[in-house]
Amino acid sequence: MNQIRGLLGEHGVVIAQAIGNLRRALPRVVDDESNGLTSIVRALIGELREELSDLDGRIAIYDRKIMELYRTSEACQRLGEVEGIGPITATALVAAAGDGRCFRNGRQFAAWIGLVPRQRSSGGRSRLLGISKRGDRYLRTLLIHGARAVMGRIRGKQDPRSLWLLKVRERHHANVVAVALANKNARIAWSLLARGLNYDQRQTVSSASAPRAV
């Protein structure tokens, strides 16, 4: 998509952001002979459009495979009950961590993903810095994106988890809260996998603390 936008932009054809706008505009751009595109550029855009369509089809196939894995995995089903963890994240967590028992606790699991704060000690005092970003970057990205999605839907909700997030959001930047929620979800995921538990939102909220990661 970036390649298509860049090529069209060089020839004065600008398409609004968002993938939907690009998909809707491509047929018109390719077929419109009055937009100043040369035949060579028009042919190249047509090839890129076919490549994009092929990628869409391949992605759709893998999406169906992921959903099949999710539906047939009892562990994935339990993880999917957590707000911010969907089929893609659940299957990725199970594929990467198995039953989670290779980690001693949830904090070690979150540290392996790179969601715990780095520490710097000086003069006997420890200072918490930003998250380490070590470990599995893909899982970390999925969990943070999932946390941001949760935060975008909490207004107006009255469940304990949403009320807790709203209260924390008043005191901290959105990015800090998103990382803190991703950290919490990683620890919850470890507990569900390693201990074979079912998700209970009330317990996660009652044990919640203010975020310290950036």
Image (spheres, rainbow, N blue to C red):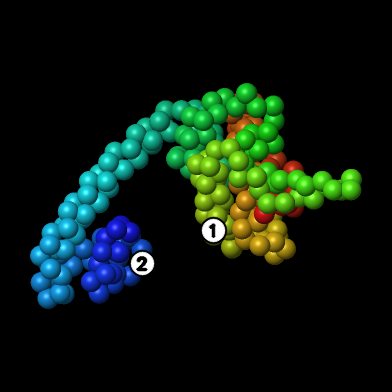
The structure residue drawn at horizontal position 65% and vertical position 45%, both measured from the top left corner, is 132
As measured in the structure, the alpha-carbon distance from the residue carrying label 1 to the one carrying label 2 is: 23 Å
Reply above or below: 84 against 31: above
Instruction: Name the foreground residue: 118 vs 64.
Output: 118
Image coordinates for residue 44, horizontal then vertical, percent: 17, 58
The structure residue drawn at horizontal position 68% and vertical position 33%, both measured from the top left corner, is 108
Left or right of 98 in this view: 180:
right
Left or right of 207 in this view: 140:
left
The structure residue drawn at horizontal position 51% and vertical position 45%, both measured from the top left corner, is 142
| Crowd class of label 1 (few under 14; some 14 to 19; many from 20; radius 10 Å) | few
Question: Considering the numbered disc 2 on the image, is that residue within a helix, a strand or a loop?
Answer: loop
Quarter the C terminus occupies: bottom right
Question: Considering the numbered disc 1 on the image, is that residue within a helix, a strand or a loop?
Answer: loop
Task: Give the amino acid type for the residue marked by disc 1 in the picture.
Answer: Arg
Quarter the N terminus occupies: bottom left
> Residue 98 sits in which quadrant?
top right
> Residue 66 sits in which quadrant?
top left
| Res 23 label | none
Instruction: Name the foreground residue: 126 vs 168.
Output: 126
Image coordinates for residue 33, horizontal then vertical, percent: 10, 72
Image coordinates for residue 43, horizontal then vertical, percent: 13, 59
Task: Give the amino acid type for the residue marked by disc 2 in the picture.
Answer: Gln
Image coordinates for residue 196, horizontal then vertical, percent: 61, 26
Q: Mark 1 points at which residue?
A: 153
The answer to whether residue 187 of the structure is visible from this angle is no
Reply above or below: 132 against 94: below
In this rendering, the count of numbered labels is: 2
The answer to whether residue 131 of the structure is visible from this angle is yes
The structure residue drawn at horizontal position 33% and vertical position 70%, both measured from the top left corner, is 16
Reply above or below: 195 against 83: above
Q: Name the residue under label 2.
A: 17
Q: Which residue lies furthest to the right in this view?
A: 124
